[in-house]
Image: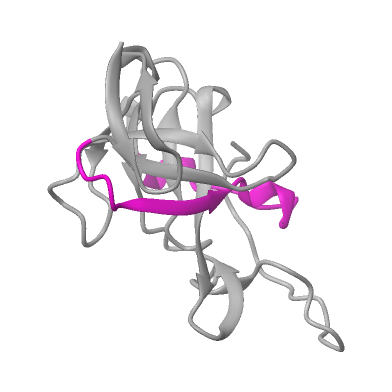
Amino acid sequence: MRTIQTRFHGAIAIDEGDLLHIDYEILGFEQERQFVLLPHRPDSPFLYLQSATTPSLAFVCIDPLLRVPDYQLPRDELPAALGDPSDWAVLALCTIGNGFPPTMNLRSPLIFNRETRHGGQFVLSLPYPIQYPLFPVEGAAPEAASHAGTHP
């Protein structure tokens, strides 16, 4: 067990086996290589991707399939080191606050192998938006996007 300081949960004890290892850097955070996933609240679909070394760094993320059921990943664009897609955990980084509607980044998901706990962020060639609305926008028509690849 190891104690880390977190942005939203204070000091917590984590098992080394709970760490996620970043082999494929998170854009703009190249020096950050270890994170842990923490719940936002027990009844919330959101998670915090908390840096294990920088207490102030925590990203809000969500499983993109909760909002985009047909979200797919182009297996041929992703490294074989991630293993079989059935072993992947996929998360979308969220932007919440700053006076704008909350969004999630579907173009650059975080993908981790659940068994090895290794992964990182990947920029996809598919035409997914970087700022996909987290919640339905009133009066807006549903977005249609062409998707190719395999489902995680």
Colour scheme: one colour
Residue at 46% from the left image edge and 34% from the top image edge = 37
Q: Is residue 120 left or right of residue 130?
A: left
- Where the N terminus falls, by quadrant? top left
Q: Is residue 8 left or right of residue 2?
A: right
* Depth check, front residue: 48 or 62: 48
- What percent of the width, then of the height, locates residue 12? 38, 27
Residue at 60% from the left image edge and 72% from the top image edge = 102
Q: Is residue 106 left or right of residue 135?
A: left
- The image quadrant of residue 81 is top left
- The image quadrant of residue 20 is top left
- What percent of the width, then of the height, locates residue 36? 38, 32
- What percent of the width, then of the height, locates residue 89? 52, 33
Q: Is residue 133 magenta?
A: no
- Where the C terminus falls, by quadrant? top right
Extent of the magenta region: 53-78
- What percent of the width, then of the height, locates residue 43? 75, 40
* Depth check, front residue: 15 or 64: 15
> In the rendered image of this protein, does residue 16 appear above or below residue 53?
above
Q: Is residue 72 magenta?
A: yes
Residue at 47% from the left image edge and 40% from the top image edge = 75
* Depth check, front residue: 60 or 11: 11
How many numbered marks are there? 0
> In the rendered image of this protein, does residue 73 appear above or below residue 135?
above
Residue at 58% from the left image edge and 44% from the top image edge = 40
> In the rendered image of this protein, does residue 34 appear above or below residue 17?
below
